[in-house]
Image (cartoon, rainbow, N blue to C red):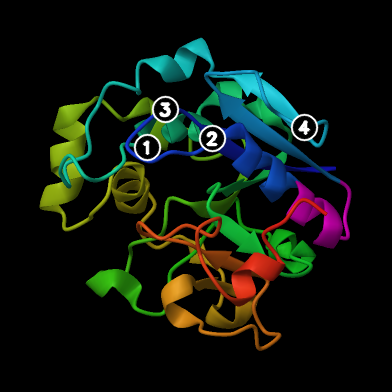
Amino acid sequence: MVSIVTWLWQGKRAYLPEHVNVLARMFKRTLSIPHQLICITDTTDGFSDDVEVMQTPESAKWLTGFKSPEGEGFPSCYRRLWMFSDDAKCLGKQVLLVDIDMVVLRDAAHLFKQRASFVGWRPRSRWGEPDRVGGGIYLLRTGAHTEVYEDFCGYRSIQEAREAGFRGSDQAWLSYKLQGCAVWPHDCGIVSQHEISRDDGRACIVQYNGNVKPWAAKGWPATHWRME
């Protein structure tokens, strides 16, 4: 069994347990391999039976106080660096880290076939930095690359990644530490909502980077973002 892991906390953007419930149901409808969806969260109320709830580990809480260098309007996701700690082995041998705000269109089992200990996602735009990978979806063999967690020492590390040209919060640090890592090919089926205007059958997961979220979007995404 593989683990799909997402994080929920109170922050700049209003994510709710019901959004996690829909995410779990979309994977349950489409994913053809045995899996569990784990939500690491500060709250335990409001989740469906499709979600395995895990309270934020003590060894992740020290990461919650660091602000994003991008400014007040951007989320701070440093707590997710805990995924690279040795403690994260409790999640299972192989985990797919996902953002809550994504739409699952069809079977994503092929994403788990990569053999590398870490596999990142890079949108077609490449964000202007060839080694930058997203913080919202990646495949990780737990216990690998513990240096991403162990070497992080707060604002000094944040500045170090920024001076190296990497943007974002947790994704800047993990991109900086994992330069040259394996990435899924562009035709793997993961796309940003900025890269797709209709469901043409090629995408399996749509990433909703930015302020527009799938539960507020109109049109074809709503046919997939549902509990049924």
- Amino acid type at image mark 4: Ser
**Residue 92 shown left or right of residue 116 in the figure:** right
| Residue closer to the observer: 54 or 110 | 54
Residue located beneath label 3 in the image = 10
The single residue placed furthest to the bottom in the displayed view is 200
Residue 80 located within the stretch drawn in magenta: no
Image disc number at residue 77? 1
The quadrant in which the N terminus is found is: top right
> In the rendering, at what x and y percent does residue 36 appear?
79, 39
Mark closer to the chain start, 3 or 1? 3
> In the rendering, at what x and y percent does residue 201 appear?
71, 85
- Amino acid type at image mark 2: Trp
Disc 2 to disc 4, C-alpha distance: 15 Å
Q: In the picture shown, does residue 171 fall above or below 185?
A: above
The quadrant in which the C terminus is found is: bottom right
Mark 3 residue crowding within 10 angstroms, few (<14) / some (14–19) / many (20+): few
- Amino acid type at image mark 1: Cys
- Amino acid type at image mark 3: Gln
Disc 1 to disc 2, C-alpha distance: 9 Å
Provide the residue span drawn in magenta: 25-34
Q: Is residue 147 something that shows in the picture? A: no
